[in-house]
DNA sequence: ATAGATATTATTGTAAGATGATTAAATTGT
DNA sequence: ACAATTTAATCATCTTACAATAATATCTAT
């Protein structure tokens, strides 16, 4: 019998468990999912818990459930792939290069424009938060603390989203976090020396502080494009 | 007693009803929500239906629910504002200029880059779908059919997202649909003649057909930037 | 009086059982 | 072979009961 983690309440745990399995492909459109009754048995929980989990996954676009037809995994196109849980579940396995490319292709749309907005509209307080993140990142590079470096890197990029003062950009924070985690998770992402990485981040920050939207946008574009070009080249070699 | 629409099943309808009220601010962080028991009474449904609706809204980040504390509306920052239901509910009222600006600021990140990707990676079939949408749009303009024009306009922009061949761009289709609906909904969006609108769309399409990513990106940027500049100016005047 | 422990109670969490509604699939009749 | 009908698997809904949680009130010791 499957074992559930012990945090949260039962339907939340069921949601996590089933969501993970669906996103990782254990349950697929072909395989389908067991019926409510079978899930109750397999996990040793009541129908209430199973049904509430099914409802939550339905709300995230992962499954649909109808009488006589059972619980069916939806086409991936229907998944709410920007939902924070779905992003989290997708991070369970090691991401492929193709997936890293998808993340970067999206980031290269969002983040340069976010930097531009941050330069135009970001409050001094929010810009200070970006600067603080960059300082922490530099310290972490000095001391060779990879984990702290990643945390600060994430704070830097998310700080810019917040400084955009636009709800939709702010909402991309979980996406950005996931994308950055994924790129570090994938060992091939070692690439160039981390020194000019700090320098490149610094250029973005300076442009924002100078309230220069164009330069902020371009600096951020270059920063992400470097990573994207690297990935695209690796993908070429692979084929 | 509140009345529910008759489509779908009961918990779906409850979800729609409550979701709409939350997004429109009838229930807020201050006002809070009634308890499960009270909701059952008000809508004349069982706890099962109420609880399943609560779970779905929880999955969309709109509310949280804990023993003794009741059902609480989450901070807007937690809402899954790119969820198709949440987008739909947010479209219930007439959008303010500030909201239209937010939409356009996001579109100006996504769509130019999507056009660039479409030029690089879009299949001939998907590019043909974009062209077909533009043709329908031109016809609708000729015959003065505003509704058909909007539908074709939406198909054009969404067609480009599909042609990007990137899951994250494709996922933005509901957002783009909502943003376009909102801008038409708002009467002030009449702006320039629709003739050069077709021409401007044509430039984007031609660049994509010519497999020229840079030109595709720039053409789309200009197209959206025109609307954004217009809105920003209106906002200035308003203050 | 005040701080800290304890009891109360409102609210959600979980379970189980019963019946209704839906619809895919099997059966039947032509 | 095809259409109409029946069957049965599965989800949908309601009800009842009790457990778990946590905010609030109450009590106790200092």
Image (cartoon, coloured by chain):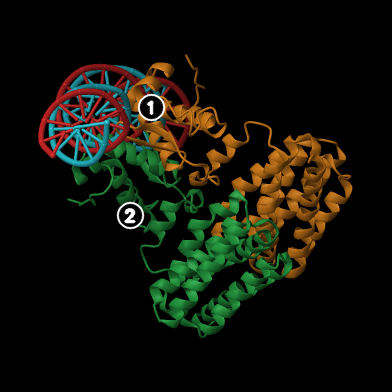
Chain colours: A green, B orange, C cyan, D red
Total marks in image? 2
Spatial distance from mark 2 to mark 1, Cα to Cα? 27 Å
Tell me the chain of label 1: B
Residue A147 x %, y %: 39, 72
Residue B135 x %, y %: 79, 49
Give the left or right position of residue C16, taking residue B178 as reference.
left
> Picture quarter containing residue C26?
top left
Residue furthest top in the image: B1
Q: Nearer the viewer, residue A63 or A130?
A: A130
Residue B169 image label:
none
Q: Are marks 2 and 1 on the same chain?
A: no
Residue B183 x %, y %: 73, 41
Q: Quadrant of the C terminus of chain B?
A: top right
Residue B50 image label:
1
At mark 2, the secondary structure is helix
Give the left or right position of residue D16, taking residue B203 as reference.
left
Residue furthest bottom in the image: A193
Residue A40 x %, y %: 22, 40
- Identify the residue at horizontal 38%, vertical 57% (top origin): A89
Mark 2 surroundings within 10 Å by alpha-carbon count, few (fewer than 14), some (14 through 19), many (20 or more): some
Q: Nearer the viewer, residue A174 or A146?
A: A146
Tell me the chain of label 2: A
- Identify the residue at horizontal 31%, vertical 36% (top origin): A51
Q: Nearer the viewer, residue B40 or B199?
A: B40
Residue B13, above or below B80: above
- Asked whether residue A27 is in view, the answer is no
> Picture quarter containing residue B20?
top right
Residue A198, above or below B180: below
Residue A21 image label:
2
Residue C19, above or below A215: above
At mark 1, the secondary structure is helix
- Identify the residue at horizontal 62%, vertical 70% (top origin): A205
């Amino acid at each position: 019998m499957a074992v559930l983690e012990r945090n949260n309440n039962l339907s939340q745990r069921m949601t996590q468990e089933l969501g993970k399995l669906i996103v990782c492909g254990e349950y697929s459109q072909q395989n389908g999912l067991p019926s409510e009754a079978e899930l109750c048995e397999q996990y040793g929980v009541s129908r209430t818990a199973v049904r509430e989990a099914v409802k939550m996954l339905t709300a995230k676009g992962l499954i649909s459930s109808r009488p006589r037809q059972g619980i069916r995994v939806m086409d991936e196109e229907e998944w709410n792939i920007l939902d924070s849980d779905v992003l989290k579940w997708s991070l369970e396995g090691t991401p492929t290069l193709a997936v890293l490319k998808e993340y970067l292709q999206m980031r290269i749309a969002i983040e340069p424009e976010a930097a531009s907005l941050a330069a135009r509209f970001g409050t001094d307080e929010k810009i200070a938060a970006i600067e603080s993140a960059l300082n922490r990142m530099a310290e972490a590079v000095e001391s060779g603390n990879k984990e702290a470096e990643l945390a600060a890197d994430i704070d830097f990029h998310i700080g810019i989203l917040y400084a955009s003062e636009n709800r939709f950009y702010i909402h991309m924070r979980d996406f950005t976090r996931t994308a950055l985690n994924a790129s570090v998770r994938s060992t091939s992402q070692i690439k160039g020396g981390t020194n000019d990485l700090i320098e490149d981040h610094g250029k973005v920050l300076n442009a924002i502080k100078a309230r220069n939207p164009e330069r902020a946008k371009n600096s951020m574009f270059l920063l992400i494009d470097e990573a994207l070009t690297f990935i695209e080249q690796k993908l070429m070699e692979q084929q």
